[in-house]
Each structure stands twice: as structure tokens, then as C-alpha cells.
Amino acid sequence: MCVDPLTGALIGTTLLTAGSQIMAGNAQDSAARLNARQYDVQRSEAATETSSALRKRFREYEQVSGLNTVAAALSGLAVSSFDATTGANLGVALEDLRTITASGASREGALATAAATERARGKSAKQASRFEAFSTVAGAAITYETNRGPDQGSLFSIFGEK
């Protein structure tokens, strides 16, 4: 099959366009995977920050509890008053620890969802680029077959069609 130079150039640009579409999809997928990795790192940092905040709050409770013990001993408070104060402090500390844990889990969950969304977006872009490339090549082939002259060979001659 021999094609004239203009048709050859059109076929070449069609293939170049299709290749560019595939490369663009690959680039979008790579960028999305990079973004997902960044979200994974942020999620790990959020877990570390949550652990750090929990330890800090627990240390604060221990310090306050120790100070309360010293203050109660020096002031001569009754044991029941000391127990009530310590129990109240413990209740506040436990509620703070629950809040810190819930907040950290929420942030980590949001970042995990963002990472998964980025990965899905990348795969979708990559797949869409393949369909666009196929559509470009198929559209060019159909246009060529529709408009070819009687002396030009069919692109589909490899399938036995004349």
C-alpha cells in the first residue's frame, strides 16, 4: 500500500497526537500517585502528632495530680475532698484524651480518603487517555476511508478488504 505524502503526514500527526494523549494520561497518573504519597506522609505525620498530643496531655494530668497531692498534704484536706478533686481532674483528662484521639482519627481518615481519591483519579485519567488515543486513531482511519480517492489503497487492506 502506497500513500501520498499528505496522507502520510496526516497519519503521522494522528499517531503523534494519539501518543501524546497516552503520555499526558501517564503524566496525570504519575502526578496523582505523587499527591497520594504526599497525603500518606501527611497521614503518618498526623498519627505522630496525635500520639505526641496524647503524651503531652497525660504528662499534664500527672503534673496536676502530683501538685494536687502535695497541696492536699500541705493543706490538711480530708481524704474525701482530695479524692473528689483527683477524680474530677481524671475525668477532664480522660475526656481530653478522647477528644484528641477522635480528632486525630478524623484527620487521618480524611487524609487516607484523599490519597485513595488521588490514586483513583490518576487511574481514571490514564484509562481515559487510552480511550482518547484509540478514538483519535479510529476517527482518522474512518475519515481516511471515507475520503480516499479511487487510486488510494484502503487502510483496512491488512484484513483482506480492498
Image: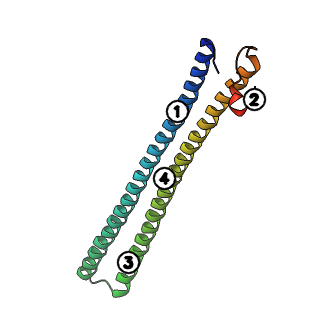
Earlier sequence position, callout 4 versus callout 2: 4
Q: Residues within 10 Å of mark 1 (few under 14, many from 20)?
A: some
Q: Is residue 90 above or below residue 14?
A: below
Earlier sequence position, callout 2 versus callout 3: 3
Disc 1 and disc 3: Cα gap in Å?
65 Å
Earlier sequence position, callout 4 versus callout 3: 3
Locate residue 153, reporting x and y percent: 70, 20
Disc 1 and disc 2: Cα gap in Å?
34 Å
Disc 1 is placed on an element classified as helix
- On residue 111, the disc is 4
Locate residue 69, reporting x and y percent: 28, 79
Q: Identify the residue shown where x is 33% and y is 71%.
A: 61
Q: Identify the residue shown where x is 73% and y is 22%.
A: 145
Earlier sequence position, callout 1 versus callout 3: 1
Earlier sequence position, callout 1 versus callout 4: 1
Viewer-side residue, 155 vs 38: 155
In the rendered image, the quadrant that contains the C terminus is top right
Q: What is the quadrant of residue 8 in the picture?
A: top right
Residue type at numbered disc 4: Leu
Disc 4 and disc 3: Cα gap in Å?
39 Å
Q: Residues within 10 Å of mark 2 (few under 14, many from 20)?
A: few
In the rendered image, the quadrant that contains the N terminus is top right
Q: What is the quadrant of residue 58 in the picture?
A: bottom left
